[in-house]
Image (cartoon, rainbow, N blue to C red):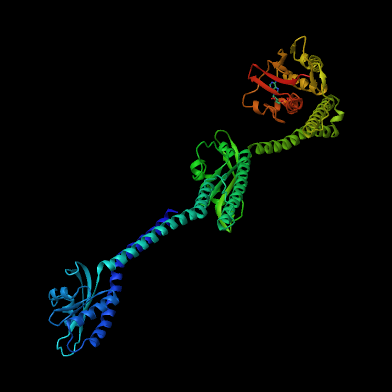
């Protein structure tokens, strides 16, 4: 608005100044042109009117006539400069007029045929504009001069009038331009400013502001287009933000580690799982993988993934700090419009998988081995008997006894394996009932009593008289007791002691079976519940163990919602404890 008003003002002022400076010149020129035309017109008239001997009164009359007709001062001057007639003065005054020969316009008229000057007239006492031309008079060798003059004030008066009109016009134009500027501001500039402010807010992410313009013209169209655009962008931003939040939530809740790099191999995203996996506690964004994860294999994988085209690179990384772990890394390039835009690497901790795989392999090997040993023994003795040893009454009984023991072991092994497989496949039938733990212990102790007596081992119990019942399958609970008591008797030397203590811990009943046996080395403790894991294989076999007892105990306790653990000191004894929920 200011610019518009300013521009109009400058144009008006320039026009005004220009007109002012040229007005006077223009008017004078106009008057000059008129005078010139008139003087020439009169020159012819006078020349034809003047006779051979023109009298003063005649010339004065001519001058008067011209002056009156043209409303100018007309003067007729003889060749010697004597004024013969003047329309402004009477005869007497004319006679007293000084010689006009030296007047510049007169001199110019003689010399050039036309004279003009602008100066102060002593006769009329005002500034006048003069013009003179020579007159050819009969009988006169040197021409006379006719001069016309107008007061400059007349010209200036007219000019002042015009000047006033122009000033008024300019003032009116100013008022109009101010009104125009206000109009433009109201209808165009203000809405545009409002829209610019809304657009700036949009750029800053604030979509709450709207443009309120209801005009039906282009400005109104522009405003509603801007409002529509604002709504659309707001919707899109909301969608993108929601997607981003979803993506971030997925990334951070993923168990797998994820790393995304740009096309230069610099990290763009590194999720919390990956940070935890490699113990990264510094900002990773913008750095190379090697700067954050001190592992050359990860850096190699990132480079490989960037080079590959759609192909999936895969590798296994072994970490030794803080403990041995195996990480499976899969990397692939991120392709966009046919070119590689970065890479994505996914890290899976496969340590547990590897451990389970090893256990599975060990299990198969162990089962075959455990089965083969008694079968080989039975087969060997059967062959010996068939080969004639049957006749040897003394040894044959011994051989058959060994065959019986091995088949018994085989049966126990198969029974334990079946139990384990039933538990693991969820096919074992468990009937949860309210069970008295003291009764369960007594029944198990009765089963073990003979073995214990044979080794003079005393089984003592430390069970409170009043105990809450537990929620358990009675048969399976007895199996847990039997397995643990059996182990305690097996691995405790003669005359040892086994103490069974029962207590209530929170919402569980806790049972501890402590012996005074050989104890278990601390290295073996973490693996003691694995299938077929035995500290001393030969010794365990000798004692009729299958290596599955503790594994079965662990599974049964877990099915009941309890926990089992072991504390042991080599040479002093072992305590197995387990919990069963109170009914
Ligand atoms: P096993 O049939 O060999 O006894 P288990 O699974 O019952 O198999 O036990 C696994 C191993 O744990 C045993 O071979 C033995 O080395 C060790 N073990 C179990 N109980 C005891 C204990 N009370 N004292 C010492 N060692 C034990």
- In the image, 376 versus 451, the foreground residue is 451
The location of residue 383, given as percent across then percent down, is 83, 35
Q: Residue 172 lies in what quarter of the image?
A: bottom left
- In the image, 33 versus 85, the foreground residue is 85
- In the image, 455 versus 307, the foreground residue is 307
| View quadrant of ligand 1 | top right
The location of residue 106, given as percent across then percent down, is 17, 78
Q: Is residue 185 left or right of residue 566?
A: left
Residue pictured at 52% horizontal, 49% vertical: 194
State the quadrant of the C terminus. Answer: top right
Q: Is residue 295 above or below residue 311?
A: above
Q: Residue 453 lies in what quarter of the image?
A: top right
Residue pictured at 46% horizontal, 55% vertical: 179
Count of numbered circles on the image? 0
Q: Is residue 205 above or below residue 576?
A: below
Residue pictured at 16% horizontal, 90% vertical: 139
The location of residue 560, given as percent across then percent down, is 76, 25
Whether residue 328 appears in this view of the structure is no
Q: Is residue 4 left or right of residue 582?
A: left
Whether residue 83 appears in this view of the structure is yes
Instruction: In the displayed orientation, state which residue is furthest to the top.
Output: 465
Q: Residue 527 lies in what quarter of the image?
A: top right
Q: Is residue 92 left or right of residue 278?
A: left
State the quadrant of the N terminus. Answer: bottom left
Q: Is residue 107 above or below residue 6?
A: below
The location of residue 368, given as percent across then percent down, is 75, 36
- In the image, 167 versus 156, the foreground residue is 156
């Amino acid at each position: 608005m200011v610019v518009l008003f300013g521009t109009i003002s400058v144009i008006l002022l320039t026009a005004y100044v220009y007109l002012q400076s040229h007005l006077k010149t223009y008017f004078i020129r106009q008057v000059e042109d008129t005078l010139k035309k008139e003087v020439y017109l009169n020159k012819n008239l006078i020349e034809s009117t003047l006779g051979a001997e023109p009298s003063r009164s005649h010339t004065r009359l001519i001058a008067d006539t011209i002056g009156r007709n043209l409303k100018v001062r007309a003067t007729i001057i003889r060749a010697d400069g004597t004024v013969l007639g003047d329309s402004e003065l009477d005869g007497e005054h004319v006679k007293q007029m000084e010689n006009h020969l030296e007047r510049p316009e007169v001199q110019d008229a003689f010399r050039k045929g036309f004279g003009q000057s602008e100066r102060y007239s002593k006769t009329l006492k005002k500034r006048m504009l003069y013009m003179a031309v020579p007159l050819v008079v009969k009988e006169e060798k040197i021409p006379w001069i006719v001069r016309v003059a107008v007061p400059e004030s007349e010209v200036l008066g007219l000019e002042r009038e015009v000047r006033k009109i122009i000033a008024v016009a300019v003032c009116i134009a100013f008022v109009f331009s101010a009104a125009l500027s206000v109009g433009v501001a109201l209808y165009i500039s203000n809405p545009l400013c409002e829209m610019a402010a809304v657009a700036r807010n949009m750029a800053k992410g604030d979509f709450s502001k709207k443009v309120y313009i209801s005009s039906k013209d282009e400005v109104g169209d522009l405003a509603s287009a801007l409002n529509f655009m604002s709504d659309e962008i707001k919707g899109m931003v909301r969608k993108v933000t929601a997607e981003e939040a979803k993506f971030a939530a997925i990334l951070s809740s993923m168990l797998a580690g994820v790393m995304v790099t740009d096309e230069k191999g610099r990290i763009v995203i590194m999720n919390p799982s990956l940070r935890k996996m490699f113990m990264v506690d510094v900002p990773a964004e913008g750095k190379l993988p090697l700067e954050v994860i001190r592992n050359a294999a990860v850096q190699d994988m990132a480079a490989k993934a960037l080079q590959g085209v759609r192909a999936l690179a895969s590798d296994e990384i072994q970490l030794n700090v803080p403990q041995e772990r195996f990480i499976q890394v899969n990397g692939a390039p991120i392709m966009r419009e046919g070119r590689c835009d970065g890479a994505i690497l996914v890290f899976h901790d496969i340590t547990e998988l590897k451990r389970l795989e090893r256990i599975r392999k060990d299990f198969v090997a162990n089962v075959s081995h455990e089965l083969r040993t008694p079968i080989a023994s039975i087969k060997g003795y059967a062959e010996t008997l068939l080969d004639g040893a049957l006749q040897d009454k003394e040894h044959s009984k011994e051989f058959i006894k060994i065959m019986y023991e091995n088949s018994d072991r085989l049966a126990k092994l198969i029974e334990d394996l079946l139990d384990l497989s039933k538990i693991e496949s969820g096919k074992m039938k468990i009937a949860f009932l309210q069970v008295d733990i003291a009764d369960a212990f007594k029944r198990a102790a009765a089963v073990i009593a003979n073995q214990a007596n044979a080794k003079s081992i005393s089984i003592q119990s430390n069970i409170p008289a009043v105990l809450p019942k537990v929620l358990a399958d009675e048969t399976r609970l007895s199996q847990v007791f039997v397995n643990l008591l059996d182990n305690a008797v097996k691995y405790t030397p003669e005359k040892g002691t086994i103490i069974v203590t029962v207590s209530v811990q929170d919402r569980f009943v806790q049972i501890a079976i402590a012996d005074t046996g050989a104890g278990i080395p601390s290295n073996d403790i973490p693996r003691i519940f694995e299938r077929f894991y035995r500290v001393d294989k030969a010794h365990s076999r000798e004692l009729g163990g299958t290596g599955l007892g503790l594994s079965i105990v662990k599974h049964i306790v877990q099915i009941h919602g309890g926990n089992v653990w072991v504390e042991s000191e080599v040479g002093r004894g072992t305590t197995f404890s387990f919990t069963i929920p109170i009914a």
